[in-house]
Structures are given as C-alpha cells and as structure tokens.
Image: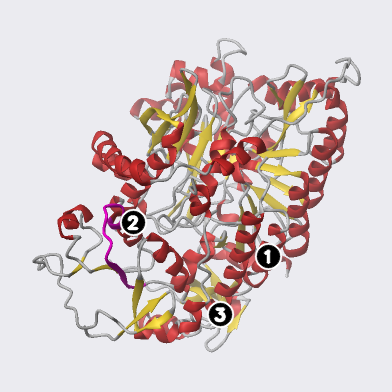
Amino acid sequence: MTDQTQIITPEGFAEDRFAETPVPTLEDYRGGVAVFLPVNADPASLAPHFSVLSLIVVPFASSADGRGFSLAAALRAQGYKGHLRARGHILVDQFRAALRSGFNDVEITTTQAARNPEAQWRAVPLGTGYQSRLFAA
Amino acid sequence: MYTYTDFDRDFLRARVAEFRDQVARRVDGSLTEDEFKPLRLMNGVYLQLHAYMLRVAIPYGTLRSAQMRKLAEIADRWDKGYGHFTTRQNIQFNWPKLSDVPDMLDALADVDMHAIQTSGNCIRNVTADHFAGATPGEVEDPRITAELIRQWSTDHPEFAYLPRKFKLAVTGTEEDRAVIRFHDIGIRVRQQNGEIGYQVVIGGGLGRTPMIGKVVRDFLPRADLFAYLEAILKVYNLSGRRDNKYKARIKILVHETGVEELKARIEGAFETQKRLLPDLNPDVVNRIHESFAPPAFKETDFDPNTGQTPPLQAFIDTNTHPHKRADHLSVTVSIKPIGGTPGDATSDQMRALADIAETHAYDELRISHEQNVILPHVHRANLPAIYAALRDAGLATANIGLISDIIACPGMDYCALATARSIPIAQQIGEAFSDLDAQHDIGPLKIKISGCINACGHHHVGHIGILGLDRAGVENYQITLGGDGTEDATLGARTGPGFAYDEIVPAVERLIETYLDHRSSPDETFLALYRRLGLAPFKAALYGDTHAKAA
Amino acid sequence: MPRPFAPKIATANHLLEGDVIYFTDPGWSRDHSDAAVAQTVAEADALLARASQEPHLTVGVYLADAALVDGRPAPTHFREAFRTCGPSNYFHGKQAE
C-alpha cells in the first residue's frame, strides 16, 4: 500500500493485527482467510467461505457513500462471524454507525489521522441507540 | 401526543453536544467543508443565499403550546422574529448564525424538539395526515405508526448516507391528505379481517422527474412493517444510483429497474430481515399507543347560535373540517394573509396560537403540508372565542382551499438552489384576488409555486402549478394545469412557453377568467372543468388562438 | 464563437455568520463594490485560488460575473443582485445594514 494507514478500534488507535495477512481482491480470491469486498459485490457470493474467512475489508471511497454500512450489516445477517474492517474515508462522526453496522475497526490514511487525532475518536459516544431500544424484545 | 422519556431526552442532549463539537472541529480544520456539510445538514442546518437556515423537525406536524412558545422565543432571540412553516410540516428559521445553532438546538431540546434529519441524504422527518386522530373515517391514528418510524429511523446506523434524501408519509384514511403517492415510501394504515396493516407505496416524488408512487404491498401485516422498510432501504442503499444526484432518488431506481424486478429484490431482502429482526419492544409500542389516545373531549350543552355572526359563519364554512365527534370540528388557521408570505408567522402570532390551543383546543396544534396551522380538536362552543382571538392576531383569513391559499417555496428570496423568486408571485396573486367574496365565487383552487425544478412548492400537483426558471439571466415562469396530490394523484400538464416576472400574474388572471366563462355551474370546480375541457381553452387564453392551434 | 470574457469577482458566505462576503484580495468585505476584479481567465483562476485559501473563514467560494460601473464592480445576474441586498418580502439582510 502506498499511503500509510491507521487502525482505529473502540479502544482507540491500534496496531494492525492483520498487518502480515495478504488481502486479495474478490477477483483474485481463491478461498483464503482474507478478502477485499467491493461495495457493489453480492455479499451472498462469499457465504460459502465464511467458515474460513477471518478478515473482510470493505472500502469507503468517500464518506458520503454509505453502501459499506449496508454491506457490513448484510454480511453479519448472512452469518459472517470473522473480523470486518471499514477502509477509506470514514469520519469520526461515522465511527458509531460503522461499529453498529457490524464493523470491528476502521482503517484511515495517516494524513486523515493527523487531522483527526485519537482523542476525537475516543470522544465518540458509543451508547445505545433508538434501534436497540425499539427492538429490545 | 408522544411524550419524551429520559432515553429520548438524553439522546437529544448528546446529539446537541455532538453538533457543538462538530462546529468546533469545522472551525479548527479537523473537518473540511465537504465533510462537515452532510453533518450539519443532518442537524437541519442549510446554507442559503443570504444566511444559514435552521429547519426544525415537527414530527408528523404535531405541537403542544409550550413547544410553539419556544419556537416564538427562538425566533425572537436568535432570528428575526418570525418563522416559516414548510410543506413537510416543519418550521424554518432564515437568519441563524452557525455559531448560535448549538444554543438554538439546546433551547429546542428544553421542549423535546430537535432538527435531526430534517435535511441530508438520510431518512427525513416523517409526515402524516394533519387531521390525524380527529378526522372521521380513520382506521387508526397514523401518528402511532409515524412515531414508530421516527424512532426506528433516528440515527439509524445503516441509512444515514443514502444515495439521496428519503421521505416517508403516513395516512390513516382512504382520502389522502398526506400526499403518500408522492413520497419515497407512502404508507396507508388499513384494516383487513379486524387486523391492522399497511398499504405500501414506493418511488413517488416530484422534483425534476415527477413520478407517482407504485403499490408494492396492498396489505402488509403490522408486525412486518420494519422488516419490510429495512428491506426497501437496504436495496435502495446498495443499488440506488450515486453517479448523478438528479437520478439518485428511489423513484429512478424503480423506474430503471422496473417495479416487478425491484419488488422481487425487496421481498428477498424482506425474508432475511423478517427472520433476523427482533420483535418490537412491547413497552415502547404500548407507550406510543397510549400517547395518541384522544383527549378527554368536553361534553357541553351549547347553542350553536350563540355568538354567531356572518364573518364567523364564513370562517366556519371555509376554515373547518368535520371531526369524528359531531360536537367538535378541526379548525385550519390560514398562514396565508392576503399579500403576505405563505407559511410565515411572527413570534406574536405563534404565541397567540399557543394561547388559543392551550385555552380552547386541548393544547394541541398541527402544521399542515399546505403551510397552515391546525387546531385539530375544537368544541363548537369555543368557535366564537377562537375566531375573536385569531382576528386579534391577524390570523382569521377565511381562505382555506381558495385561490389565495397558495403553497410557495422560499424561492430565490432565500434559497441558494432557486432559479427564480416564488414569494412575490404568491403575494401578487393574493393581491390580484384580494376580495374574499370573489375568491369564494372562484371556489376550490390550489395554486402551487416552485422557484426551481426541485419542486419544493409542489407545482406538479397544483391545479395551477407555477415553476420559476432562469432563462438566459431572466426570471421566467412556466404554467402546469390539472395536477392533483390527493388520492386521485395526477401530474399537471405544461401549457406551453413560460411568462416573464411581470406577465405571470396577468396570465393567472386569464386562466381564472377562462374558468369562470366556461364552467357549467358554480359547482363545477376549476379542476373539474379542466378535466372536462382539457388544456385547449386555457391555452387559447394564455397564448391566443393561433398558438393554441399550432401547439 | 466564444463569448467575450466578463470581468469576475470572487464571493462566498462567511463560515460562522453565514452572510455574503466578497474577496478584496487580500481580505473580505460585505460590500460588492469593494471586490477585487479579474479581467482575464488567468487572473480569474488566480483570484479564485487565492480566495480559496481561508476555508476556516469562508464557505462555497466561487467566481461571479460583474460589470464595472464607475470603476467599481456591480452584479450583472439577478441572483448576484439579490445577494447584494436581501429578500424581496422583508427589509432584511444587506439592504437593512
């Protein structure tokens, strides 16, 4: 990867525990442990590999493009239990939505991380939202 | 109406604090304008032509007097002493400073109000029939469903960055005052074999490509509502176009994909959601149902002749709607004084409305999508007192449903997107037909004016629609005829070339003369005559005979 | 045939106040007639670039056509003319200042 990136978890800035894991594109995916899933892909196509996969990376080309949130929710709905990562232009203000949609962490450029230091991410309130109250059956 | 719990209040305070922080981060450079813009929009803050604008949510148009008084206070303290009621049952303040908005939001939170999701590419504030809970013929108060939708859609993690804005409306009657056929999702509460459910319509909308919504479910069982809504939103979020903002609404997805194919995809997503989505929390549901229980209606013997005067009778004839109880009425207060700005109320008028509601009308007010204020429950015995109080406040104009009850968007007097002015056209039409007797003679007529192709003034569904455009650096106004936003949903037809700023009001006058000349009797409305005779006589009046034949 | 170049000014809204401002190169004014004027395409590009250097003060910087009246810039399009005064339904905005 040309640009350096920063991983952010609910605990704050973190080391990338998948730093050594190659993440092939969906085209090049041959049944390994990690894959990069474009936002126009059908999440159901990966379902047969869920038991092997331990990392799925979903891109955010722009913070205005919310497809990744629905894609993450769809992967979780179809039974994916492994690590789910949002990579790209994700705002501090979208961190809560990313975690609630099923992502485990986000990966932003170090350029953006310089503008949005760790304290901003740690200040995001992660409490419960309307949906968890409404559907708490 | 729905009263907030600690959960709702804590949510609002946290949200205001978050926005205060977002403004600070925009100023210190942590957020660029491109990043900040969607965040401020989701909190109701637009940048207009001369200033910012704050659009405050009035969920399903329902307000208590204390809330209306707070709006008046905000208008006085942070704005210019007035507010503008909108076609989506909200209120806008036209002159706030960005640095004051967090304080304005805190003031709103004092009375359980906010500006959340009144703009941006998210699920917008949900609207409902403005006579909900009062009108005869209702299956159920649609605000029960609308409040559930409000809670479900608020800060929904999946659906805050959609391809484009997304609007829902709910009605509980077969008559459609909520314009459900022109929303992204329109919902009609229905009853089948004693069970409550919903007719669901998708893909309606106005804007530059007006479309009438398509029915995708005739009867969706109540328990399936959110699984079905989530299915629609998931399909839209993943498949809606993001390459062109003018083709990004769900109506274009419906049009380009075909309703049957899209319906199949929605049903597929629905099967998954139905399996996964937990049931609604019965405590929350029960609380909402109880919130919309009708008020304790007053039982009074009264003489309908007491206090009767001809002006009061004229007001009752024009500005009231039947109530489900024979001894009550719903009163529509016109926010369309002759020559005034449609939908604008001063802070003093807001306080007068609050006082009237509190003293005479069970403390309840509504905003209609036609930019008027409604007292939904009024005992007939209170009509003389209400009329007198309205007259004192300059709010007794008896013109509901008549030619001067015009819908107009803010147009280029305020809006950064507008291509021409709307408000002065509405003012001039009002003045041209200022005589109320003449207005009554013309009868029911809906004029709707938009200042650009985005159609916020709903011109496509006006009996007479006016669209203001910029033609080579000059304002130009096109006319459409025969539009209808009710259960008979119809799009207006364009008459032909547009008119200059100083020609449009005389053109409207010619349309009215044509109607009066051709109608078979005073009972034949403008719309009925148009449906009988079509465009031809109107085109002749607008452009002369040669033009009409050539066109 | 290309249209003759119309002189340009740079304008925006103030980030915190929200009102209309004009780039005076350097600095900003609330008055259209104070605006710096670009007479060529190259000057206009450079003017826009310099006006865009202060994102913490401004929102939505853009170039607008102007005409020179007694050597000072005046708006040519009706939208820009409205921006110099305010709405037509109330005496609010710049016309009241």
What kind of residue is marked 1?
A: Gly
| Residue B22 percent across, percent down from the top left | 55, 73
Q: Residue at x 34, y 49 (%)?
A: B234
* Label 3 sits on residue: B27
Vertical arrangement, residue B124 with respect to residue B428, above or below: below
Query: Is residue B20 positioned above or below B68 on the image?
Result: below
How far apart are labels 3 and 1 at the CA level? 24 Å
Residue B170 covered by magenta stretch? no
Q: Position of residue C84 (x, y in %)?
A: 61, 68
Instruction: Verify whether residue A82 appears in magenta.
Output: yes
Taking the spot 45% from the left edge, 48% from the top edge, the residue there is B454
Number of marks in picture: 3
Q: Position of residue B422 (x, y in %)?
A: 57, 47
Tag shown at residue A36: none
The residue positioned 63% from the left and 47% from the top of the image is B58
The subunit carrying tag 3 is: B
Q: Nearer the viewer, mark 3 or mark 2?
A: 2
Q: Which residue is mark 2?
A: A73
User: Please, which residue is most extreme toward the top here?
Assistant: B520
> CB under 8 Å between callouts 1 and 2?
no
Discs 3 and 2 lie in a common subunit: no
1 vs 2, front mark? 2
Q: Going 29% across and 36% down the picture, which residue do you hit?
A: B263
Q: Nearer the viewer, mark 3 or mark 1?
A: 3
Q: Are marks 3 and 1 in contact (CB under 8 Å)?
A: no
User: What is the residue that sits farthest to the bottom in this orientation?
Assistant: C26
Report, in whole angstroms, how far the alpha carbon at label 3 lies from the one at label 2. 34 Å
For disc 1, the marked residue is C93
> Where on the picture, by quarter, is residue B13?
bottom right
Side of B101 where A27 appears, left or right: left
